[in-house]
Each structure stands twice: as C-alpha cells, then as structure tokens.
Image (spheres, rainbow, N blue to C red):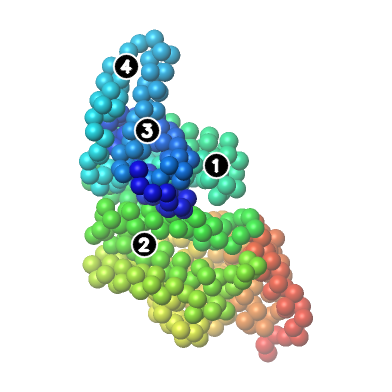
Amino acid sequence: MTGRFPDEHAEHLLRELAPQVLSAVTRRFRDFAAAEDAVQEALITATLKWPQTGLPENPRGWLIRVASRRMMDYLRSEEARHGRENEVGIESARQAEAAEMEPQSDEDDTLNLFFMCCHPSLTPASAIALILRALGGLTTAEIAHAFFVPESTMAQRISRAKAGIKSSGAHFSAPTPHERAERLRAVLHVLYLIFNEGYTASGGPQVQRVELSREAIRLARCLHGVIPDDPEVAGLLSLMLLTDARRAARTTPDEELIPLDKQDRSLWDQAEIAEGTALVRDAIAKGAIGIYQLQAAIAALHDEASRAEDTDWPQILALYDLMKHMSDNPMVALNHAVAAAMVHGPSKGLELLRALDGDPRIAGHHRLDAVRAHLLEMTGDYPSAITHYRLAASRTTSLPEQRYLQLQVARLIETPQQRPS
C-alpha cells in the first residue's frame, strides 16, 4: 500500500476506474447486469477502505479482484438456487480469481459500455441513470439525490434498464458500423442531458448541480479519448467546456441567478474557454458540421465577448438559422427568436415566438413565458411583461429561477410604466 490520501482523491480515481473495471469484469463473466452490481459493491468497499488503509499499488486490479469475488458469490448463489452447475460461469470465476488480474486495454470496452448503456430499448431517463452508475461510478443513492427522486424509484429505474438490456439479447461486443452510427447520437444526447441538468437544475433549491455537470464533462472527455476524430464528440465536449466556463459567475453567494448579460466576465474560466474554442475550431475544420459543433460555436462567440454589448449577435443569429434547418427543436427556435430580437429588435423576436405557441413540445414551458416577458419589457410593455414573468415563475420548479422571475415582477412594478408610441 502507498500512503493515505484524501477522500476526494479516492472519489475521482474510483469514477475514472469504474468503466475500466466494469468492462473487464463484463468481458470475463459475460453478464452485464450482475457484473455492474458486483463492480458497484467493489467501488463502495474501496470508498470505505482506501481512505483508511491507503491506495493499493494496483487500484484497478484490486477493484477487479473484489468485483470478481462478488461474481463468484453470485454464481454460487445462482447455482444453489437453480440446483445446477453453471460450468461456464464458475470456471470463468475460478480463472479470474486465480489469474493475475491485469486487464487488457480498455479502449474498445469503454466505448462498448457507452453503447450498451444507450441501447435502443432504453428510455433516455433509464440510459442517463445507467450511464451515471455504470460509467460514472455513482451509487443509486447519489443518482436519486441528483434527480430529486426516492432511492427506491431510481433503483427500480436502473433495474428495469439492466433487465431491458438482458431481454434484448445485447452482447458485450464491439457495435456494428450501423449500430455505432445509430447509437452514438443517443450517447451524445444522454451526456448532453446530464450536463444540462447539472448546469441548470430542473428543480430544487440550487441553480446548478455541479457534480452532474462535472461528471458529464469527465464522461465526454472519456468518449473523446476513445473516438478522437469524431467532430460531434469534440463539439459536445467543447460546448460543455465553453458553457461550464461561466459557472462561477452565474450565481451570487446566496444562490441568486445572474443572467448572462449581467455576469462578471472576469470570473469566467479562461482555461476552459481556450480548450473549448480550440476543440470546436478543429472540429469544424473537418467539414462535417453538426448540432453540437454549432452550439459550441455560439457558446464561443458569447465567451469571446469581453462585454455583453460586444457580443456578435448577427453571427449568432446566422448560426441559429443554420441550426433551425438542421433540427426541428423548439428550444433552438426559442433561442433563434432571442437572437433575432437582438439583431432586428424585440418585435421581430415576439413575432417568431407566436409560431411556438401552437407547439405542444414547448407551449406552457416556463422558458417560453420568460423570453416573451423579457422581449415585452424591451418594447416597454411592462404590464404584459409582468403577466408573463409571473406565469413563468408559476411554471418552473427551480426555486432560484422562481425567485429571479419574481424579482423581475417586483422591479417592473416599481418602474414607471410605459409603452412605446
């Protein structure tokens, strides 16, 4: 054993090792669901032991040995329950326990785990839970806490996900070219959802769930490491970095929300901005432009402006125009309306918002009301702006967003009301 080390070091190392250990154990025992449970138990054991006993000389081998012993126990239990010998499983377990537990290269296996966790039979919510547990090394309790659901609910969601993979007959093997093309989009979407939930929590008392956004960045780095030449993988990592760079400036010490145009830009993380900008520049140069690259390019334009008034809104609008042609996404259309308002005036933005009122995917969403309120305020129609700020506040489950929107109402009530002639 080496010397003792802080708990946060253990946590980072365990999450980094989780996919490598799971891939090795799954490859040996050919049972993803049981291997995932065994690896979780090994991670929990390490969390409890390593801070007291010190870091093993071979942490990955240590985890694989412990997980393999759990698999041995599981296979023997299954043998006794079914009253028959599981010859293949028991022999694999014996070999794993006896052999030197140095795993082979985990590069392909890590990618296989991403694809397995995003199997087409799973819902996005199930895929998110499975990726955070299998690839992120988070416990069921940690995932449940992050998404404000009871641990029992999250446990059922994860169990259904693993059962879905098992019933689908999916094997732990390299995907076919068709499966890779099909599932990579799903993998990127799940990582995008994890990051968004961390950067802007959908509910609860905090604006951000930093542990989730950081984990999404770590997993995106992992994916970029195994697919370094894919421009959309690089684009997503770039988008995360360029967005996360503003994290320190987004809230007051009291967790009050600060909008982008009011943020102290000296607090933005310049190292993340530089890395993200380089990633998106290199990705776009490869010629295959995708949605994540375009979003990253927009984020870069925001980050490059030293003042809000220096933002290159015409170029941002042009990028949103391109995105609208590539994706039928109401949030893209909403952001496009904002950019149009910044270039052509708030009336143009309000005109574009009317087209979204009939879209059931966003009609009734608090962000549509919040944007409309902001544009109405820009026109000087304060009574209507107050109405929509109140409506937006009533529709969000995020307490910081509620407070921010209610503050806008109070501010406008105290402002002399006017309408442009």
Dot 3 or dot 2: first in sequence order is 3
Helix, strand or loop at label 4? It is loop
User: Between marks 4 and 1, how big is the CA–CA gap?
Assistant: 32 Å
Give the left or right position of residue 249, taking residue 291 as reference: right
* Residue 37 versus residue 120 in the image, above or below: above
User: Between marks 3 and 2, how big is the CA–CA gap?
Assistant: 33 Å
Give the residue pinned by disc 2: 237
Q: Amino acid at mark 3?
A: Val
Dot 1 or dot 3: first in sequence order is 3
Q: Nearer the viewer, mark 3 or mark 2?
A: 3
Give the residue pinned by disc 4: 86
At x 31% / y 62%, what residue is drawn? 234
Q: Amino acid at mark 4?
A: Asn
- Direction bottom: furthest residue: 421
Residue contact at pointers 3 and 4, CB within 8 angstroms:
no
The image quadrant of residue 377 is bottom right
Give the residue pinned by disc 3: 66
Residue contact at pointers 2 and 4, CB within 8 angstroms:
no
Dot 3 or dot 4: first in sequence order is 3
Question: Which mark, residue 141?
Answer: 1
